């Protein structure tokens, strides 16, 4: 007999597959209602004759009925074929994959650091509620949470130019030949510090505020009072009794943030010229490179759906009531 938890996971997986199918369908429809002829956008040659345009449309299957195009599109997406970039004149997959790797290298460590710091300071602020420590932590968290990314990035760039002397753009120094792996890694780390710091600081406050709020509610429960009366040490009380229940609302926020790791951070990557997906999306909008936008949209939305599926599974484990 299938347990309630397994049945719950299967239901969530089916719902996620339906969501992914809807995303792929919307992606197909959305870019076909946009203005402009895709052949003229792809070749960008004003001297193309009407006959040449019709020939190219036949070659790319654009003269077929919309339903046929949809099934061809579905088959291509399932094979990882996301089309040809208008601007780069090569496969969208070949353009996207290196950018996704660059983005994950930057955004994943920053997000994990922000989560760990946010959970830690959120626990301290909740436990020391209404104290000076709580005020300092919450003022810092709310201040950082409200800061515009481009503003903080700009301040760090100015500090670097006048004092810190770190690279302010790119992932590596352009045109340099590295004699060994150590030199390569040191140059990468010098470029990594400023965008990593910016991303960590602007996302850290969110986790602190949410966890503190959830933890304060849990700390007023009767079972916590009883545990306090029994003299259970503070660390054990917070980590073993209170944090598990307080993590329920935080899990959703963590899942969404991890899902958006693939999307990159458009503003941070643009400010620091980091060659990731966020910067690629920004350039694709400027160049009207619809296949790149289409491919990025699919990958980003699917990663968010999968992250939410993982969050639902964790949620079901932490709180058996949601399995019904």
Image (cartoon, rainbow, N blue to C red):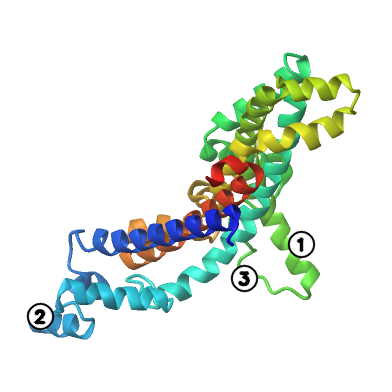
Front: mark 3 or 2: 2
Q: Position of residue 101 (x, y in %)?
A: 58, 66
- Crowd class of label 3 (few under 14; some 14 to 19; many from 20; radius 10 Å): few
> Looking at the image, do the residues carrying marks 1 and 2 touch, with CB atoms under 8 Å apart?
no
Label 3 secondary element:
loop
Cα separation between marks 1 and 2 = 54 Å
Label drawn at residue 49: 2
Residue pictured at 14% horizontal, 75% vertical: 65
Q: Which sits in the foreground, 125 or 270?
A: 125
User: Looking at the image, is mark 1 or mark 3 nearer the viewer?
Assistant: 1
Q: Secondary structure at mark 1?
A: helix
Q: CA distance from mark 3 to mark 2?
A: 42 Å
Q: Is residue 155 visible?
A: no
Which quadrant of the figure contains the N terminus?
bottom right
Checking the image for residue 186, the label placed there is 1
Res. 301 image quadrant: bottom left
The image quadrant that residue 24 belongs to is bottom left
Q: For the residues marked 1 and 3, what is the alpha-carbon distance in whole angstroms? A: 16 Å
Find the residue positioned furthest to the left: 50
Q: Quadrant of residue 73?
A: bottom left
Say which residue label 3 marks: 175
Q: Residue at x 65, y 23 (%)?
A: 217
Task: Look at 38% across and 60% down and name the residue there.
Answer: 18
């Amino acid at each position: 007999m299938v347990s309630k938890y397994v049945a719950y996971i299967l239901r969530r997986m089916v719902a996620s597959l339906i969501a992914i199918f809807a995303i792929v369908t919307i992606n197909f429809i959305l870019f076909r209602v946009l203005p402009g002829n895709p052949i003229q956008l792809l070749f960008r040659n004003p001297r193309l004759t009407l006959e040449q345009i019709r020939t190219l449309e036949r070659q790319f299957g654009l003269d077929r009925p919309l339903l046929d195009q949809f099934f061809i599109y579905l088959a291509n997406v399932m094979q990882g074929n996301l089309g040809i970039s208008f601007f780069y004149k090569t496969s969208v997959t070949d353009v996207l994959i290196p950018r996704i790797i660059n983005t994950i290298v930057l955004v994943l460590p920053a997000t994990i650091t922000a989560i760990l710091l946010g959970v830690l300071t959120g626990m301290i602020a909740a436990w020391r509620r209404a104290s000076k420590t709580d005020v300092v932590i919450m003022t810092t968290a709310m201040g950082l949470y409200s800061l515009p990314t481009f503003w903080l990035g700009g301040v760090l760039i100015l500090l670097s130019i006048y004092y810190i002397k770190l690279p302010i753009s790119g992932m590596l120094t352009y045109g340099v030949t590295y004699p060994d792996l150590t030199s390569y890694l040191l140059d990468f780390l010098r470029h990594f510090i400023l965008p990593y710091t910016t991303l960590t600081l602007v996302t850290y406050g969110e986790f602190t505020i949410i966890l503190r709020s959830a933890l304060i509610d849990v700390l007023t429960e009767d079972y916590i009072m009883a545990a306090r009366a029994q003299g259970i040490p503070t660390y054990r009380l917070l980590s073993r009794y209170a944090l598990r229940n307080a993590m329920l609302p935080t899990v959703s926020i963590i899942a969404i943030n991890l899902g958006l790791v693939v999307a990159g951070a458009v503003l941070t990557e643009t400010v620091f010229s980091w060659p990731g997906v966020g910067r690629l999306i920004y350039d694709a909008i400027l160049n009207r490179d619809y296949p790149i936008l289409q491919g990025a949209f699919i990958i980003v939305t699917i990663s968010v759906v999968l992250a939410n599926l993982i969050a639902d599974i964790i949620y079901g484990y932490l709180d058996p009531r949601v399995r019904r």
